[in-house]
């Protein structure tokens, strides 16, 4: 993961060592709320599985990629 700054506390996040529980939010909730990536074909939110996957993915499925 690239170095990233938390949009809640403005602290630098390095190597997935940020404790989202301090903000009373899960990683999935944080990235869906503050990053909110959408599938380029359907416009639906990208499904969060991991931080790296979330930033590298533009489609929820191969079907959406082919249709795009």
Image (cartoon, rainbow, N blue to C red):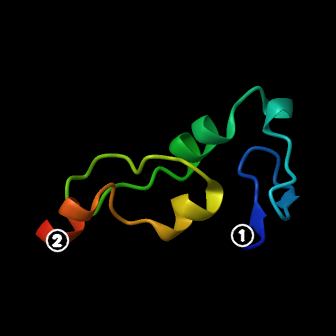
The total of numbered circles placed on residues is: 2
Q: Of tags 1 and 2, which is closer to the observer?
A: 2
Are there few (<14), some (14-19), or many (20+) residues within 10 Å of tag 1? few
Circle on res. 1: 1
Image coordinates of residue 5 in percent, x first then y, are: 77, 61
**Residue 61 placement, left or right of 36:** left
Q: Please identify the quadrant where the N terminus is shown.
A: bottom right
Image coordinates of residue 68 in percent, x first then y, are: 16, 70
- Which corner quadrant of the image does residue 33 belong to? top right
Residue at x 33%, y 61% (from the top left corner):
59
Q: Nearer the viewer, residue 42 or 7?
A: 42
- Which corner quadrant of the image does residue 3 belong to? bottom right
Image coordinates of residue 57 in percent, x first then y, are: 44, 65
Residue where numbered disc 2 is placed: 66
Of labels 1 and 2, earlier in sequence is 1
Vertical order, 9 against 54 (above or below): above
**Residue 54 placement, left or right of 9:** left
Image coordinates of residue 43 in percent, x first then y, are: 25, 52
Residue extending furthest toward the top: 24
Circle on res. 25: none
Residue at x 82%, y 46% (from the top left corner):
9
């Amino acid at each position: 993961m690239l170095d990233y700054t938390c949009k809640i506390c403005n602290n630098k996040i390095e190597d997935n060592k940020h404790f989202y529980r301090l903000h009373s939010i899960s990683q999935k909730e944080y990235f869906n709320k503050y990053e909110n990536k959408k599938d380029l074909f359907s416009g639906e939110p990208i499904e969060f599985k991991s931080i790296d996957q979330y930033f590298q993915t533009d489609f929820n499925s191969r079907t959406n990629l082919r249709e795009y």
